[in-house]
Image (spheres, coloured by chain):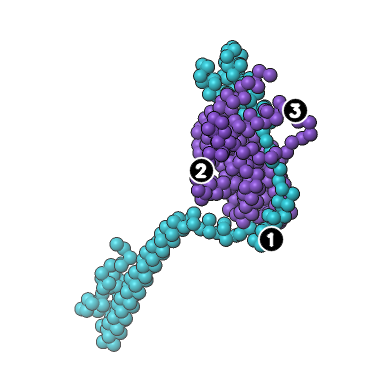
């Protein structure tokens, strides 16, 4: 379940703590900013990774995001909205990077037997003794998320994986609440179709 | 609520994003509709599968160090950013208020100058009238004709303001 009564994802105590760290970081307190980094960097990294599909690029963009966020901290008016603001900046970096990139032409060697582009799945952390079924499920989930159109993928990731509220997601992507709600529902239905074979297990 | 409507609200229902009135409607419908019960269950399982099996990547161990190096070059968060942002946003309002303030100020100053000139003019006329009246009175005293009915111009010398009123043509402050 995402969201709270006032439309933000984090519990109220956490938000107060985060707001305090932001307040201190605005004055140049790097220890407080380190706490914010420790709290959010991994989530930002995985969000960006979903959008760019490359761990190295995601790492670089995450660092760029946190440097830019520190420089712009004093433009954030409400300290307790830091999380949504952070994701918004991360998203902007992703789109800036993609807009400046030339279209990627798929060569024949990159197509599989059915003529579809081969999706490179980056090395992920694997625990010892991970079952075949779990690995299969992971591949299915990754394929399902990766096959979503960009517009649906970002709201799906922000809701189902990052557990942000709909209002926060609307603020991040710059669309209306109604539009975000519809797209999240459509994205879930699309992913459900991909994983339907595992729903009866 | 019908099945189509219920289906559209299911994701928001699961995410706790529906108002309470709608939550009750969805619950009431799902309790009586096997198809929607199954669909809700499928959506719930879908989210559970994604949460449990999506790939996560870890931060590089030197990530913060790289950020820190750049932050230390930056110094404190930029105040200028806020000033530029704040100024840019409020610039049209500031210009409009400044223009309005200047206009009102100039108008008030002009009125003040006009009032002052009118007052000075009135005082000059008043003083001139009093001096004329005093000179006339002195001449009459010298001649010894004060109070003589044969000389009506000395008439009502006890109220010099009557003469002043006739001389100045009225109070310039009265429009």
- Camera-nearest residue between A77 and B141: A77
Instruction: Name the residue that disc number 2 marks.
Output: A105
Same chain, labels 1 and 2: no
Query: How far across and down, in percent of the image, does residue A160 sit?
Result: 63, 32
Q: Please identify which colour was used for chain B in the image.
A: cyan
- The answer to whether residue A1 is above or below residue B136 is above
Q: CA distance from mark 1 to mark 2?
A: 40 Å
Please, what secondary structure does the residue beneath circle 2 have? loop
- Distance from disc 3 to disc 1, alpha carbons, whole Å, reads 45 Å
Can you name the residue that lies furthest to the left here? B150
In three-dimensional space, the C-alpha distance between marks 3 and 2, rounded to whole angstroms, equals: 36 Å
Which residue is located at x 45 percent, y 55 percent?
A: B93
Within 10 Å of disc 2 (Cα), the crowding (few <14, some 14-19, many 20+) is few
Name the quadrant containing residue B163: bottom left
Q: Return the mark for residue A131.
A: 3
> Looking at the picture, how far across and down is residue A197, in whole percent?
63, 21
Task: Tell me, yes or no, whether the two marked residues, 3 and 2, touch with CB atoms within 8 Å.
Answer: no
Between B170 and A14, the residue placed more toward the observer is: A14
């Amino acid at each position: 379940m995402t969201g709270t009564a006032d439309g933000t994802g984090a519990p109220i105590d956490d938000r107060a703590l985060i707001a305090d760290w932001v307040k201190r970081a605005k004055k140049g307190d790097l220890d407080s900013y380190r706490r914010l980094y420790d709290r959010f960097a991994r989530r930002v990294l995985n969000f960006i990774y979903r959008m760019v599909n490359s761990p190295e690029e995601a790492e670089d963009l995450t660092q760029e995001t946190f440097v830019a966020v520190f420089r712009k901290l004093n433009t954030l008016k409400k300290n307790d909205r830091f999380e949504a603001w952070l994701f918004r900046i991360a998203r902007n970096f992703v789109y800036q990077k993609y807009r400046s990139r030339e279209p990627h032409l798929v060569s024949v060697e990159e197509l599989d037997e059915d003529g579809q582009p081969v999706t490179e799945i980056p090395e992920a952390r694997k625990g010892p003794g991970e079952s075949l079924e779990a690995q299969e499920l992971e591949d299915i989930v990754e394929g399902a998320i990766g096959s979503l159109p960009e517009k649906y993928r970002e709201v799906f990731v922000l809701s189902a994986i990052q557990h942000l509220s709909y209002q926060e997601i609307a603020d991040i992507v710059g669309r209306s609440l109604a539009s975000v709600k519809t797209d999240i529902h459509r994205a879930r239905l699309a992913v459900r179709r991909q994983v339907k074979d595992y729903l009866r297990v | 609520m019908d099945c189509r409507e219920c289906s559209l609200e299911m994701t928001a229902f699961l995410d706790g994003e529906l108002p309470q009135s709608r939550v009750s409607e969805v619950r009431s419908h799902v309790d009586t509709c096997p198809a929607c019960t199954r669909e809700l269950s499928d959506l719930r399982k879908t989210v559970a599968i994604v949460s449990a099996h999506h790939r996560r990547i870890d931060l590089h161990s030197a990530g913060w160090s790289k950020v820190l190096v750049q932050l230390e070059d930056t110094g404190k968060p930029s105040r200028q950013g806020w000033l530029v942002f704040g100024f840019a946003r409020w610039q049209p309002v500031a210009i409009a208020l400044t223009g309005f303030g200047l206009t009102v100020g100039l108008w008030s100053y002009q009125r003040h100058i006009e009032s002052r000139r009118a007052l000075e003019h009135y005082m000059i006329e008043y003083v001139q009238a009093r001096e004329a009246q005093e000179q006339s009175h002195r001449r009459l005293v010298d001649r010894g004709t004060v109070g003589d009915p044969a000389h009506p111009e000395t008439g009502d010398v006890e109220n010099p303001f009557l003469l002043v009123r006739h001389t100045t043509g009225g109070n310039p402050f009265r429009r």
